[in-house]
Image: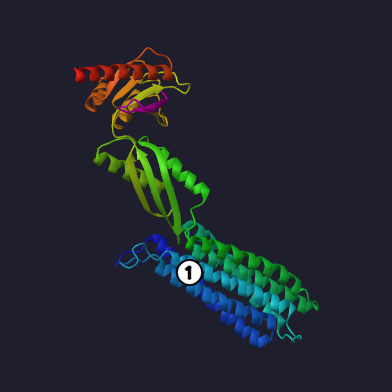
Amino acid sequence: MTEKSSDQILKERWALGSLILNTTLTILKFVVALITGSLALMAEAVHSFSDLIASVISLISVKLAARKSSEFPYGLYKLENMASVLISFFLFFAAYEILKEAFFSEGEREIKHTELAIAVMFVAMVSTFIYSRLELKAAKKLNSPALLADAQHIWADFLSSLIVMVGLIGTYFGYNLDKYAAGIVALFIFHSGWEIFTSGLKVLLDVSLDREEMEKIKRIIYSHPAVVDIKRIRGRAAGSFKFLDIELLLHNFSLRETHRIVDEIERKIKEEIPNVDTVFIHYEPVRQEGWRIAFLVDDEDNIRDFKTATKIVIVDLSKDGKVQINKPLEVEPDEREIGEILSKINIDIVVSSHHPEEFGVRWKLAKAGVMVWETDRKKFSEALEEVIKSYESFAKKQEGEKDG
């Protein structure tokens, strides 16, 4: 049996707490409604009963959502979203009940023991207010749509309790003001239900993660020096969890090193983005043949050395002379760090104003098969032209020797 995570245990505890609270309030309101003869309190008891049913759905969905099996290898996460959609219908029903009670009830009932009814509604208001705020905070922390929907529903119960309280106090003083406030609050409840319904439905239809979160994921990916470009990125949510499908262009490495890089990117995404269940990364090498040349430059594209460069511009030069200038890698102006990066990204040549001074850096580059090309050219474009002309001259010489 799979051991439950601490987040899952907390979700189940909050859902169970909501169930206990709504069961207690439903019984209390029904009993006091029968004693006092208050139709508003009886309607509120019916509303609390709808909360009770919603809490049962929430608890069941939270318990089942994290389970995985051979039939459901991706889990039953979407049960949380299905539950939130169902709970939204309870909110619509609650809004309808409040409007019907406020504007379409026939006749007036004599209310007995008004003080008792007010006391009960005060207890209901305080308990629902406190629990809804605490559960809302927990839902955001745990990223649980089911708990979020339940917290919104309990908050709606607080608002409807407030309406009943106003009506009871008005009755106590001989005024009837509750139906106007009821209409306003019912619209708020309907709006909450609509928000919950649309957000749950979007997830069930596999809508993309929000733009801000996708941009954050892109920044995490691009921060890795091995990444040349993101060809495609897709993300979706299911319950509390997120799933990512990413296609990357990477600098050429050995298969073992590439796996390590992909694992590193996945780990960083999961560290910085909450509740990511799966990151599927498909990767392609940026080029198959030719030369890879790194130019050490500053922010103004001046050629620099290993100690002063702030960027590495990587250029792929194909066998037929085609040039591809890739996205620059930003680096700290540190000889050891730059040497470390260049030794790992499958560079053939590094163009610099001077050779590295430290023997350790030279040795690491030599082991990686990297040749340092020292140039007196000042600008990146000039140095690139120098290398291309040298390559073209070399290629022609090679072709001539082959023909000879």
Q: How many marks?
A: 1
Bounds of the magenta span? 309-323
Query: Dot 1 lies on which element?
Result: helix
Residue 318 is left or right of residue 329, and the answer is left
Residue 79 in the image: x percent, y percent? 44, 68
Name the residue at the top extreme: 376
Residue 14 in the image: x percent, y percent? 48, 67
- Give 194 or 385, whichever is nearer the viewer: 385
**Residue at 60%, 67% in the rendered image:** 193
| Quadrant of residue 292 within the rendered picture | top left
| Quadrant of residue 114 within the rendered picture | bottom right
**Residue at 20%, 20% in the rendered image:** 402
Check the image and report above or below for 345 versus 262: above
Identity of the amino acid at label 1?
Answer: Ala
Check the image and report above or below for 33 versus 136: below
Query: In this orientation, does residue 402 appear?
Result: yes
- Give 235 or 12, whichever is nearer the viewer: 235
Determine if the magenta segment contains residue 69. no
Residue tagged 1: 15
Crowd around label 1: few <14 · some 14–19 · many ≥20 (10 Å):
many
Name the residue at the right extreme: 174
Picture quarter with the N terminus: bottom left
**Residue at 73%, 76% in the rendered image:** 167
Residue 129 in the image: x percent, y percent? 60, 66
Check the image and report above or below for 396 versus 230: above
Name the residue at the front extreme: 403
Residue 152 in the image: x percent, y percent? 58, 65
| Applied colour scheme | rainbow
- Give 385 or 337, whichever is nearer the viewer: 385
**Residue at 25%, 23% in the rendered image:** 360
- Give 49 or 30, whichever is nearer the viewer: 49
